[in-house]
Amino acid sequence: MVDSMDNKAEEQGEGLKTSGEPSVRAPRRVRADAQRNIDSLLQSAMQVFAVSGVDAPVREIAEKAGVGIGTVYRHFPERSDLIVAVFRHEVDACAAAAATLASEYEPGEALSRWMQRYVDFIAAKRGLAAALHSGNPAFDVLPAYFQKHLRPALQNLLDAAAAEGKVRTDVDPDDLLMAVASLSSFSAPGDSQGDQKRRMIALLMDGLRYNATAPQ
Amino acid sequence: MVDSMDNKAEEQGEGLKTSGEPSVRAPRRVRADAQRNIDSLLQSAMQVFAVSGVDAPVREIAEKAGVGIGTVYRHFPERSDLIVAVFRHEVDACAAAAATLASEYEPGEALSRWMQRYVDFIAAKRGLAAALHSGNPAFDVLPAYFQKHLRPALQNLLDAAAAEGKVRTDVDPDDLLMAVASLSSFSAPGDSQGDQKRRMIALLMDGLRYNATAPQ
DNA sequence: ATTACAAGCGGAACACCGCTCCATATATAT
DNA sequence: ATATATATGGAGCGGTGTTCCGCTTGTAAT
């Protein structure tokens, strides 16, 4: 019952910014108007979640997208499905940013910039992280998705930077992702502006550069 | 409006297991039957939260306690007040365990056992930790309460252990509390039984013993 | 172009939630 | 025994997630 949501429309949610492929596979899977509504819903959900948090009412999202409630539940049978879909979408965007940055900057700089991108991503997902650990089994699949997509992205950046001797070669991307995510959560009481977090993450990045093979 | 909940009944919730004092201060503050209901509510809430998580409906708690919904809201004006009260209660219990253990075991052993107690406490509060970071300002007071009560408890254990040279003297109790709590959250996907967590915490404790002044 | 129909749609309705309100009941001081 | 401040219970309110189903529409075969 939980696993039976594979052929859902979530994967079809292209066209938001990375509409590379026309998203056609099987002969006419989803109707054009339906696809339009799905895109619109993901757009609206992303914005509403960002503003009002993941507890925002479904009706609000439906209204903003200009569709009825029934339409929402046709494509996302449960509220959590919408959340998961948005989360995946943003993970994809963050992973895609790695390739973009790698082509625009030299390896060390690309790595730095992507880490900042990643930190922003985690920070923005504060409310969602709470939902993640709320015991709802619907979110159990997210950590795996998280790791599966973000790990290779970071791996590439690390390899490129390591090839130039900018960073060490013995760091596990998973550890780095987890460590940064972990540091980004659990803020101390007096850390109002997140300064402590920033410092801790900066330190972590310095540790990454420690003992690199060559200064240049 | 948020700050005006000071003279609430939460503090009166004695008699659960540590009914040392009769909890009388001002001449007849709460009626006896009311006190009984408050205790019963805290008991029920603790059990229900443990079983069904902090999202459990208030009606269920009221029913289990054998009181009406109105009674719940008389003593705990908002749902979050009940959660806060239960949380404080369990923090108190955990802090109290420090003194008990200190009197029953030698310092090193007492410290070890209390850390295990603390880990259990954090693990059990998984759902609550999610609520904690959900942005609800009602929970803003909890980290302070957490630190204020648990810190001295741990400090005493550390001092006693340090006096016997069992542990280092340069560890900040807050850092230790935060580190363990942080490690207990954010479980990795493949860490089903929490083995990784246990290992990481054990390592942390070893670090605590590293460079202690004397082997005996 | 017409047609047939699966796919999609909207929103009333339902169950359940947190919370309010107030007529009623009761513990306590006198 | 009486007075009254205090406490109680639950119907009811507004809001939520989710279901259901009659109606609409895109699509493909004709």
Image: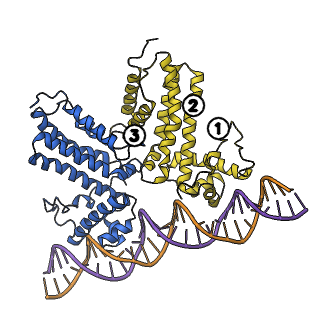
Chain colours: A blue, B yellow, C orange, D purple
| C-alpha separation, residue under disc 3 versus residue under disc 2 | 22 Å
Q: Along the line of sight, which residue is nearer the eye, B9 or B45? A: B9
Q: Residue B58 sits in which quadrant?
A: bottom right
Q: Is residue A74 above or below residue A166?
A: below
Q: Can you tell which mark lies on residue B17?
A: 1
Residue to which mark 3 is pinned: B185
Do marks 1 and 2 both belong to one polypeptide chain?
yes
Q: Along the line of sight, which residue is nearer the eye, B57 or A11? A: B57
Q: Is residue A177 left or right of residue B18?
A: left
Amino acid tagged 3:
Ser
| C-alpha separation, residue under disc 1 versus residue under disc 3 | 28 Å
Q: Chain of mark 2?
A: B
Q: Chain of mark 3?
A: B
| C-alpha separation, residue under disc 1 versus residue under disc 2 | 12 Å
Q: Is residue A155 left or right of residue B82?
A: left
Residue to which mark 2 is pinned: B97
